Image: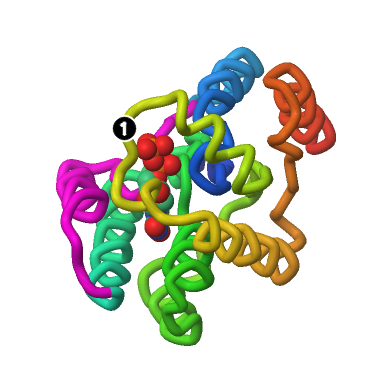
Amino acid sequence: MHVAEVAPRGLFITFEGIDGAGKSSHIDTMAAHLRAAGRRVMVTREPGGTTLAERLRGELLNTPMDALTEVLLVFAARRDHLTQAIEPALAAGTTVLCDRFTDSTFAYQGAGRGFDTGVLQQLESWVQSDLQPDLTLWFDISPEQAAQRLSTARSPDRFEQLDAAFFHRVRRGYELRAGSHAERFVRIDAGLDREAVATQVAATLRARGW
Ligand code: TYD
């Protein structure tokens, strides 16, 4: 009897950190590494990743709005991204590398803006059921060093314009999430130079046999 082959589920890996932590430059390197190891890889980002979610991203980054509106739009974008892109890819065995995910919402909207984390938890389970990343790389850096890096880069978006106290709270938010989701969080010391950061990322993959 012929039995249809079911592809093993793909890995879901997310990248987190305050603005200026430098995570984005390591995502493509990891994608290349995983492809060389024989995996099919999709690189995506949040907010964004689908036509609708990218439109919502434009509003989120540029249009002033109240905290609840911001949270609802972030999760609306996430829902579309999950149903249209992430879930189908994982089900087909594709590894998904996502630049930011729900930990960003807990760090920025929760810890940064002081939005009720109980409501965030409710939305999280509503929007993504029990889906959690297999691995989250947290690029941790001091807000002062991150600001220095950003000042030499492009013009800031709505979040990047926030003050140092905000980013201290966001960093603390990541620390709390890393504590409550220790099984998937790996802290990367992003204050080091690019090579040293890349070495930590590579070691994290190697430790998992990926
Ligand atoms: P990012 O993609 O890191 O920006 P850039 O491409 O400019 O480096 O993230 C965009 C911004 O969105 C960032 O400041 C964090 C914010 N954000 C939230 O506030 N909540 C969220 O849930 C997500 C996913 C992002």
Task: Residue 8: tell me if it is visible.
Answer: no
Compare residues 168 and 206 and report the one nearer the observer: 168
Depth order, front residue of 104/36: 104
Q: Nearer the viewer, residue 162 or 138?
A: 162
Report whether 16 appears left or right of 137. left
> How many neighbours does mark 1 have within 10 angstroms: few (below 14), some (14-19), or many (20 or more)?
few
Expressed as whole percent of the image width and height from the top left, the position of residue 59 reads 17, 53
Tell me which residue sits at (17%, 42%) in the image: 51
Asked which colour scheme the image uses, the reply is rainbow
x and y, in percent, of residue 181 in the image: 69, 65
Confirm or reject: label 1 Cβ below 8 Å from ligand 1: no
11 is higher (above) or lower (below) than 116: above
Q: Residue at x 78, y 35 (%)?
A: 204
Asked if residue 49 is among those painted magenta in the image, a careful observer would answer yes
On the question of residue 69 being in view, the answer is yes
* Residue 135, image x, y percentages: 65, 48
**Residue that protrudes farthest toward the top in the picture:** 36
**Quadrant position of residue 66:** bottom left
Q: Position of residue 122 (x, y in %)?
A: 43, 83
Residue at horizontal 35 percent and vertical 27 percent from the top:
154
Quadrant (top left, top right, bottom left, bottom right) of the C terminus: top right
Residue at (46%, 31%) from the top-left corner?
151
Name the side, left or right, on which 176 lies relative to 61. right
Is residue 118 placed above or below 189 in the rendered structure?
Answer: below
Q: Is residue 33 left or right of residue 152?
A: right
Residue type beneath disc 1: Ser
Span shown in magenta: 41-66
- The residue pinned by badge 1 equals 155
